[in-house]
Amino acid sequence: MLPDLKLAPLRYLLSIIDTGGFHAAAKQLHRSQPAISMAVRDLEERLGQRLFEKGNGKAVLTPFGRWCEPRFRELVAHHDRVCRDALAIASQQRGRVDIAAVPSVASRLMPTLLAGFLEAYPGIDISLQDGHSERVNEMVLKGEVEIGITSLWLPDDALTFEVLLHDDIGVVCRDDHPLAQKDALHWHALKPYTLIRNGTSRLLEGSPAEELLKNSTLYISNMISLTAMLEAGIGVTTLPRLAFQEEHDRLRFIPLSTPHLQRNMGLLRRAGQTLSPSGEAMQTYLLNQLRDAS
């Protein structure tokens, strides 16, 4: 049966070696010399070998003691490193957090948000992945990431979803399109034109504007391809405002006023799963920042 080595006697032994004797070690450790001697004797009994030469006025290690010294130092140092790391992670000074977000959030919001988070928590490493909403849900469910920032289309008991902001739906078209100069649009205004459906078009379902989806024959899921089609003047589409890529000068975003539709964006995490200290810090930070922004 292996001996149960307590850490305190190991520290006493190393202090005796470093200070040159039991008396000096006791003074350094603020313990009585008998207490130090008793702890060393107990350690020797547990190991079954003497650590110091008997009857020598000085603290001279036995051959076994010389073998033990570097290993005891390594053990004590490893213990102290683990304690420091655990305390640093628990106090959110160090750690790692994995996040997934839909592309519109990853490209439009996260650069500023992560810059602020890194300034507040410089010791925490961050991994950010992007993907469509179903992929973000999947990554959270599988534990590939701790936190997702997305929209939740269908309720799921395995997930918790906390709304952060509301993203208005609008119409996107080329700048020379007849609708481009409007300040707001009724869905009836889209009837004469080719509607290009995309992954967010399901937001029209259950609203009066659902009729537009039934008459649409063109669906494009990839944002790069969708943008190219819009810039080519092939048709119009509906998008949440965050998903509209403002850097494309030839495209315009016109709010859809009737019906007024929104995409709810929020924090997604596994139900009943405790976040890591780093994940807790990220969740609190995002909740505060995005709620303030909204």
Image: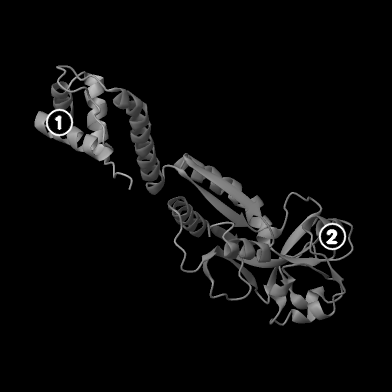
| Residue at image coords 74%, 49% | 247
Q: Residues within 10 Å of mark 2 (few under 14, many from 20)?
A: many
Residue 257 seen anywhere in this rendered image of the structure: yes
Residue on which the image places disc 2: 230
Q: Amino acid at mark 1?
A: Ser
The Cα atoms of the two marked residues, 2 and 1, are separated by 84 Å
Q: Is residue 76 above or below residue 279?
A: above
The mark that comes first in sequence, 2 or 1, is 1
Q: Residues within 10 Å of mark 1 (few under 14, many from 20)?
A: some
Give how far across and how far down residue 225 sits, in percent.
83, 57
Q: Quadrant of residue 64?
A: top left
Q: Are marks 2 and 1 in contact (CB under 8 Å)?
A: no
Whether residue 274 sits left or right of residue 190 in the image: it is: left
Residue 165 seen anywhere in this rendered image of the structure: no
Q: Which one is nearer the viewer's eye here, 125 or 196? A: 125
Where disc 1 sits, the SS reads helix
Q: Is residue 221 above or below residue 96?
A: below
Q: Amino acid at mark 2?
A: Leu
Q: Is residue 11 above or below residue 102?
A: above
Whether residue 174 sits left or right of residue 151 in the image: it is: right
Whether residue 261 sits left or right of residue 161 in the image: it is: right
- The circle drawn on residue 37 is 1
